[in-house]
Amino acid sequence: MKTDSIFYRIFQTDPGILFELLGQSPDRAQGYEFKSVEIKQVAFRIDGVFLPTPEASDLTIWFVEVQFQRDPAFYQRFFSEIYLYLNLHPETVDWQAVVIFPKRSIEPDYPHVFRANLNSDQVHRVYLEDLDESVDSLGVGLMQLIVADSGDTATQAQALLSRVQPQEQTNPRFAAIMELIETIVVYKFPQLSREEIESMLGLSELKQTKVYQEALDEGRQEEGQSLILRLLTRRIGDVAPELRSQIRALSLVQIEALGEALLDFKQPADLVNWLQDHRSE
């Protein structure tokens, strides 16, 4: 199963899940954006970084690594990437790191030289096999579904879906998580078609309802807004908070139009002008 892409989608959909794994409030994620960070000088990319937004009160950066294959040199690489990032970004106020292993046997025997890092309060190791099954959290449940045995996958997926009350199904977060549940099951049963999986999970009728379609569209709109903000940052630098607010108020059609237009942007003024021209649409 393509675990890296699955986890990336999970944290993109609901960043609060990371903090739930650490036993903290998911509300901590409200001031963060989850993204990959490219370090051009050495041509590599850190795939999981929670960067505080410009208006965030907590400026701690969170580095996240998902490690599902045993790699004896994992910690050498992981801490090298972190300290290289810190060297290139001296403005960093504070940092935390989270490593997610499916089970303890995957973690490499860490060298003595990393004892200060691994025994500090800055580095957190999560073992999915140790997660409490009684925790009533969709996010934690998604993590458990990823490492579930094939024989238990359908039952656990159905149990996750049943946790959501009918009145919550209009929430775009639910629609996005339901898509993730379905995607995880697709990866686990590659021999089945998506239609067969929808039938197995009892999703066919629900996905045809108007409330689900509206929730899914709203979720796609939020995802599109986040993507546009990341692309704009790469294109013209940091986007001012007042411009971010205007972007988050755009419709899905406007978001798609901005996605095409930003390819020609060369400076922040181009974004300001575009928003002014499309304000009344």
Image: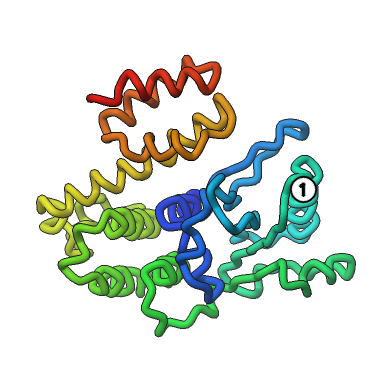
**Which residue is painted at 77% across and 70% down in the image?**
118
Residue in front for this viewpoint, 74 or 189 = 74
**Percent of width and height locating residue 224:** 37, 38
Residue found at the very far bottom of the displayed protein:
134
Residue in front for this viewpoint, 20 or 148 = 20
**Percent of width and height locating residue 105:** 66, 73
Q: Amino acid at mark 1?
A: Leu
Tell me if I can see residue 63 in this picture. Answer: no
Q: Residues within 10 Å of mark 1 (few under 14, many from 20)?
A: some
**Percent of width and height locating residue 139:** 41, 67
Q: From the viewer's perspective, is 204 left or right of 44? A: left
**Which residue is painted at 72% across and 72% down in the image?**
121
Q: From the viewer's perspective, is 63 left or right of 119? A: left
**Percent of width and height locating residue 77:** 76, 52
Residue in front for this viewpoint, 216 or 93 = 93
Badge 1 is on which residue? 86
Residue in front for this viewpoint, 97 or 30 = 30
Secondary structure under tag 1 reads helix
**Which residue is painted at 26% across and 50% down in the image?**
193
**36, above or below 188, in the image:** above
